[in-house]
Amino acid sequence: MGQTRRVAIAGCHRMLDRKPANHNFATAFDAVPETEIAAVFDLGAETRQEFTDCWGDRVAAYDSFESMLKQEKPEILCLATSQKMHADQIQQAVESGVRGILCDKPLATSLSEADRLLDACRTSGVPLALGLDRRWLVSYRRLAALLREGIVGRLQSLIIYGIPNLINHGCHWYDVALHLAGDLEPQWVSGFVEDLSAEPPDSRRHLDPTGRCIVGLEEGVHLYFTPGGSKRPSFDVIGEQGRLTIMDDGLQAWQWQETDAPPQPLAIPQPEGDFPSGVAIVNDLVDAVASGGRTACDVEEARRATEIGFAVHLSHARQGARVDLPAAAGELSIPSVPGGNESGCPAPGFVSLPCRPPQPSEKWRLRRQSPACSSSHAAKK
């Protein structure tokens, strides 16, 4: 076992018991011997008290994020605050000497915020693990491996069903699709935001509407995203030599070939437990901190999964015109839905201001890793 690394948790309202569940990252850190929860920050006094009641008085509790960083000097930060806070808090964490960051989704409320926090991680060499947990699930990793091995031949397109919104959950859909497509670089986006004029004015759907889009990737591959209300994605993967249908959020799959034979079910490994990706994410981050490497969902993957949703809004404002990536979002800000203790933060809402024509900057033209950089994660994917 390696050294024990001190962990600070920021935003703990989903970590108030010891039952593993999505977003309860405290259970994941507690299960990894190389990490120890040392401190917690939350704006809610009752929430802080519930957390320390659950996880022990040895955990120092703070109502100031800056004070926690200064006093505790954690090596790892688990950031589960509102996305409105992420850019400032990640910058502060990097400057304070934090060596690894697990950040819950969504990443940010604008592309300028995303640029700022990702640049802080990139220039400092601090590994980031964005909590798009399907990246670490054995089911999706097996499916991605089968596609890399050529189960449908040369990839042509993916159809992705049921995206519930463009930012808050949409990032999961984009990231899974890119993973299945071999992490080819997105080149452009064309899309429309769903018409919500019939929705009541106070509907939460206005904060983060769904939509539909086409994403053009390298090598002529296309992704087609369709709207829906499901939180369990499904996919049709089409290649030159067949088709793969993926259902039930990656738990079931059938292979179709260009013959008269019926579709064949595939044996897909099933994730185990109530939060199967939690420990895998933490272990990946701990390994990246120790080795100076990167995680399976680091700055490049985080930027792509964030940028596509904002690009759909930009394209919609231009009547569906193609938006080349990387996109410049101007004044577009999408706070999405509120969560946690956000007192002192701007009121949640949706702001879509007139967009200037995008002026792509090569600064964020993120390319796939070279084989040398990605070899440490090849087995994991």
Image (spheres, helix red, strand yellow):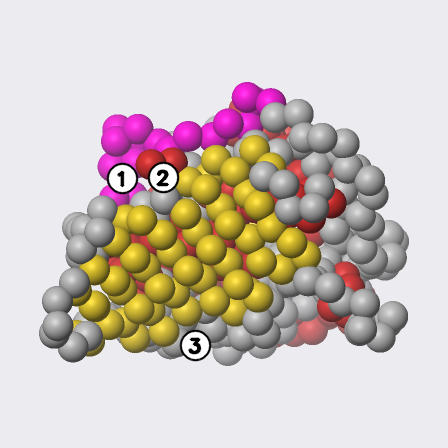
What is the crowding at mark 2: few (fewer than 14 residues within 10 Å), some, or many (at least 20)? Answer: few
The answer to whether residue 376 is magenta is yes
Query: Which mark's residue is nearer the viewer, 2 or 1?
Result: 2
Name the disc covering residue 274, or none: 3
Pointer 1: residues within 10 angstroms few (<14), some, or many (20+)? some
Depth check: 128 or 27 in front? Answer: 128
Residue drawn at x 58%, y 62% is 169
Q: Badges 2 and 1: C-beta atoms under 8 Å apart?
A: no
Amino acid type, mark 1:
Ser
Amino acid tagged 3: Asp
> What range is drawn magenta here?
361-381
Question: Which residue position is annotated with label 1?
Answer: 376
Q: How dense is the environment of label 3, judged by Cα within 10 Å: few (below 14), some, or many (20 and up)?
A: few
Position of residue 25 relative to residue 267, above or below, is above
- Which of pointers 2 and 3 indicates the residue nearer the eye? 2
Expressed as whole percent of the image width and height from the top left, the position of residue 70 reads 69, 38
Q: Nearer the viewer, residue 84 or 221?
A: 221
Residue 124, how many percent across, how many down? Answer: 53, 26
> Which image quarter: residue 221?
top left
Q: Residue at x 12, y 67 (%)?
A: 259
Say which element carries label 2: helix
Query: Position of 152 compared to 41: left or right?
Result: left
How far is disc 2 from disc 1 in space, using C-alphas? 27 Å
Give the residue type at disc 2.
Gly
